[in-house]
Amino acid sequence: MTEAALIRVIAVLILIICMILAAAWLVRRLGLAGTSRQASSLRLLGSLGLGPRHRIAIIEADGTRLVVGLHPNGINLLHTFPPSGKPSESITSEEAPASSTAGTFKDALGRAQPPSTPQ
């Protein structure tokens, strides 16, 4: 094989690899890649940062909404809402009702925080 033919083969291989990468990027960018069935049963509806390493999130799993606390040492379940009959929709802070769960959440947050010591 001559030097010119070898350069041509390498150039074509590089072109084909670039085309494959561009096609993969385009498919992901346009959202044409299908999601797995298992991933569709779990959704993040919203989250709120409480500090640099602590968050609260509302997750929907099979229609049941879970309020979880996320921290460096793991995840804690704070509250569970029963399944709703309607399709899932995101909850914003304006839409969140001030229900009897506010006391429960406050208690759970108080238990999660270490007691402050006077100095």
Image (spheres, rainbow, N blue to C red):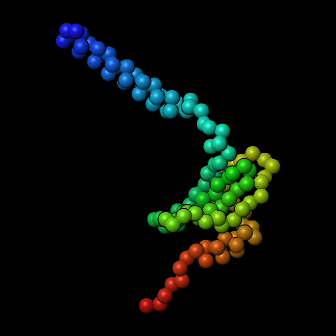
User: Is 32 drawn above or below residue 78 in the view shown?
Assistant: above
101 vs 36: above or below: below
Give the image location of residue 6, x and y in percent.
Answer: 24, 13
| Residue positioned 66% across, 76% down in the render | 107
Q: Residue at x 37, y 23 (%)?
A: 17
Residue placed furthest toward the left: 3
Give the mark count: 0
Picture coordinates of residue 66 (x, y %)?
A: 68, 59
- Residue 87 visible, this angle: yes
Q: Nearer the viewer, residue 72 or 22?
A: 72
Q: Which residue sits at x=61%, y=66%?
A: 76
Query: Based on the displayed image, in which of its 4 quarters is residue 23 positioned?
Result: top left
Report whether 86 appears left or right of 94: right
From the viewer's perspective, tell me whether residue 21 is left or right of residue 115. Answer: left
Q: Quadrant of residue 103?
A: bottom right
Q: Residue furthest front?
A: 1
Quadrant location, the N terminus: top left
Q: How far across and down, in percent of the image, does residue 55 sit?
A: 54, 63
| Quadrant for the C terminus in the image | bottom left
Q: Position of residue 35 (x, y in %)?
A: 60, 36
Identify the image quadrant of residue 80.
Answer: bottom right
Q: In the picture provided, is 87 more to the left or to the right than 29?
A: right
